[in-house]
Image (cartoon, coloured by chain):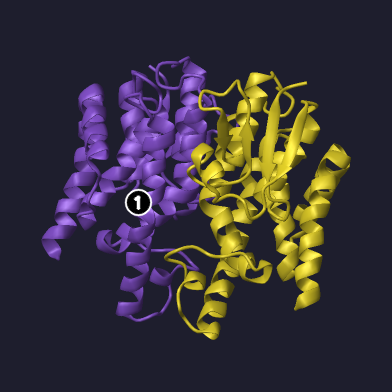
Chain colours: A purple, B yellow
Amino acid sequence: MADIKLNVIKPSVNNMSARVFLRASGLGFTENDVYGQTRTPEYLAACPAHLTPMIETSELPNGVLWESCAIMQYLSNKHGLENLYPRDPMIDSAMFYLIGTFYPYLARATYPALNFPQYPGEVGHSDADAPTKEKARQAAVEALAEPLDVFRSFYIKDRPFIGGDRPSIADIRLAATLEFLAVIDYPLPSWAKDYVAAMEKSLGDAYTEPANDVRGYIGYVRSLG
Amino acid sequence: MADIKLNVIKPSVNNMSARVFLRASGLGFTENDVYGQTRTPEYLAACPAHLTPMIETSELPNGVLWESCAIMQYLSNKHGLENLYPRDPMIDSAMFYLIGTFYPYLARATYPALNFPQYPGEVGHSDADAPTKEKARQAAVEALAEPLDVFRSFYIKDRPFIGGDRPSIADIRLAATLEFLAVIDYPLPSWAKDYVAAMEKSLGDAYTEPANDVRGYIGYVRSLG
């Protein structure tokens, strides 16, 4: 059993990615819920970026590693998991396009409904009034369609998944991300609904169990509204 | 000579990364300036994300690839450039941390001065008044210090570069990014000044030539102000 400790916050789709990956990988690991603990002196000493998911293993140069995509790349490379991370440049490109373009819009579109904080420089973080914030949120919602369709038209194309016939780490990152859109009743195009369903069918409990934590949180915040 | 065509916009540090990398790689390539042409039907047909840098080569599954970090990963893997992309998980983590956390703040802090557009959901993109936009820009400036220091305290630590003794693709991405901070006279800590100088010294003209396009653009916009 590998000595991998995965530190997570369960309602997060960034974390869901690493949680799905580790379950699908067959690697041994333990999971540690650090909700509310990422700014303790102990956590900051290990991870000055105070981020999750974050893994700890004695095999790493600094003992720890964060960034969901980098964690999946590292563990795939280290343990030869070529089925989850085949040598296909589309996988890396898709992950950077997701982190740099798609996710920022998705975060601005969904974080207010999720009661997650937004970031300096975003309208949702400013002291603008509620209608101004809602207008900015709506602008982010509208901006989602174009990069979402790029996943269909360029990265997935005529294959079932970004990785080809089987889900890759880029697919895990994308499918998990799409889970958040349920909180705003975003009208997912049918290809994207089918894609997430195919991911869940292909990965089984490895997908469903962490997804249920995200879905449960979404159900909880919706019950408050 | 490899049949790599690199499409670029020269004032951009995202593009500078790929331009520095290709010069440092020793691979043959041609460079194509696509300023003002990324939303033509031809460009969109190849790259629906209308992004630069974007490479074209017949060796790619879809013929093209974008995302500066993914381009550097792909070409390093393809051509065995282990000196620029050694198997070190810190390199991938640093690039995702840069794209997901550091760059968004840097963009909000510098794009107004660079006359670059901002994005839906950001104050700089909204119809807020000038003082409100400046306040948000300043919030992004203030947010830069913490992730910048993470590069020092975690990724670089007691080595010269993120990649160790020699610059890696993560170093190219970080050093290029820091070039933009000159447009707002950001007080770079001395380690970061030394780091960029060491990058330029180590890579020579491969760094300086593309950097001069960024620096020239910054000088131009400052001359207007």
Q: Is residue A53 above or below residue B110?
A: above
Quadrant, the N terminus of chain A: top left
Q: Pinpoint residue A209: horizontal percent, then vertical percent.
A: 21, 33
Q: Pinpoint residue A109: horizontal percent, then vertical percent.
A: 33, 60
Who is closer to the viewer here, B36 or A168? B36
Who is closer to the viewer here, A74 or A85? A85
Q: What residue did someone put label 1 on?
A: A145
Quadrant, the C terminus of chain A: bottom left
How many discs mark residues in the rendered view?
1
In the figure, is residue B37 to the left or right of A103?
right
In the figure, is residue A56 to the left or right of B154?
left
Q: Quadrant of residue B76?
A: top right
Q: Residue at x 50, y 82 (%)?
A: B132
In the figure, is residue B185 to the left or right of B108?
right
Mark 1 surroundings within 10 Å by alpha-carbon count, few (fewer than 14), some (14 through 19), many (20 or more): some
Q: Residue type at mark 1: give it.
A: Ala
Q: Pinpoint residue B37: horizontal percent, then vertical percent.
A: 62, 51
Q: Residue at x 56, y 61 (%)?
A: B105
Q: Quadrant of residue B134?
A: bottom right
The chain under label 1 reads A
Who is closer to the viewer here, A48 or B1? B1
**Residue B137 can be seen, yes or no:** yes
Residue furthest out toward the left:
A223
Q: Pinpoint residue A204: horizontal percent, then vertical percent.
A: 21, 24
Q: Residue at x 58, y 49 (%)?
A: B38
**Residue B187 can be seen, yes or no:** no
Q: Quadrant of residue A28?
A: top left
Who is closer to the viewer here, A27 or B178? B178
In the figure, is residue A75 to the left or right of A11?
right
Residue furthest out toward the front:
B41
For label 1, the SS is helix
